[in-house]
Amino acid sequence: MVALTQLVIVIVAATVVVALPNGIFIPRSSLRYQHIQDDVGRLHLVDLWAPDIEGSARYNPDTQNQYHLFTRKNPTISQPLVHGLQDLVTSSNYDPSLKTAILIHGWGDDARGQFNAVVLAAFLAAEDMNVIVVDWSAGNSGLNLIRAVRNTILSGASVARFILWLNSITGANLSQYHVVGYSLGGHQAGAVGRNLGGMVAYITGLDPAGPLFEDNEDKFAPNDGVYTEVIHTNGGGLGYLEPLGDVDFYPNGGVKMAGCLTGLCSHDRVFHYFAESVRGGVFTGSKCESYQHAVNGTCPSEDTLLMGGIEPKTGYSGVYYLQTNSWPPYSRG
């Protein structure tokens, strides 16, 4: 996603690449030109004071977003779903009686990225369910980060409209949904839930983006869903440091992950932790008095909660700290 400082493109990660089958206030005190890293590791020199000259009107998520359905019947090749085309839904493997996970990628990425591949495979391994991968790359593929941030929120509203339409023709309901977003997609997942009245059962923000969201009223919020959870792995760099959800987890302090040498490695590590938790990995967090205590790792509480997983922990709140292994399996039990 994005970083506030220039990064060396050296990615050291113990991961296996899986093939995928309205105005924003910019403080003038910030550095104007920065090297910003997208979700696939490319550096871009960005003018953070530049206005959105092209305008968000050039991106129409209702027509440009793509939705790819995967199920256990088609785990590697997607079935396209198009808003308004009911026949595509009825002829697909979509089953309204099952849970549905919605996956939303980050900046510079698309449906074929590693985040989608890793989390999609984990969900289908864990449970017979519908997994819909959102491709909103038409709204985030340019070099204008301000525009991409704005389009993040526009796309979230559009994804919400798609879900409402899908439910209207299938009889599914929001209690069956789990929306998961990574980086910019983390904030977009919150926007999806917000536009659905906070009624989505489970929303997970995976290291939601930090830059340009510090003073952004559209960032991920606790009441975006019935249960909202955020996992921080590169807070203050690529990701947002302070708490955002009902429950916020800070593995290894939430800034630099064990086994990582770069911010991108720490940022990416979040979806590997989450995928492992969905597959049954046990990440046990200890409750902290504040997020500062979590960052410092001073949370000796015996009050614990499991991070991630396929079921929401509705009714829980607070900040939690845990440690991980440097290499898979990351969970320590």
Image: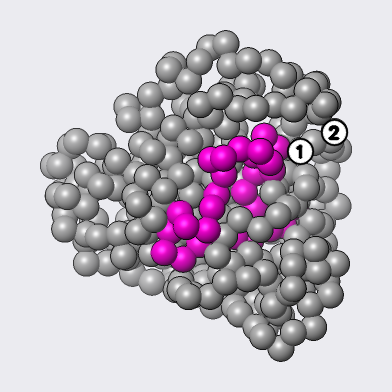
Residue 96 in the image, given as x and y percentages of width and height: 21, 61
Kind of residue sitting beneath label 1: Ala
Helix, strand or loop at disc 2?
Answer: loop
Is residue 25 something one can see in this rendering?
A: yes
Asked if residue 209 lies in the magenta stretch, the reply is yes
Residue denoted by label 1: 3
Q: Residue at x 82, y 26 (%)?
A: 29
Q: Residue at x 45, y 54 (%)?
A: 224
Density class for disc 1 (Cα within 10 Å; few <14, some 14-19, many ≥20) is many
Q: Quadrant of residue 319?
A: bottom right
Q: Quadrant of residue 63?
A: top left
Q: Residue at x 73, y 53 (%)?
A: 241
Residue denoted by label 2: 6
Asked if marks 2 and 1 touch (Cβ < 8 Å), the reply is: yes
Q: CA distance from mark 2 to mark 1?
A: 7 Å
> What residue range appears in magenta?
207-234
Q: Residue at x 63, y 71 (%)?
A: 318
Density class for disc 2 (Cα within 10 Å; few <14, some 14-19, many ≥20) is few
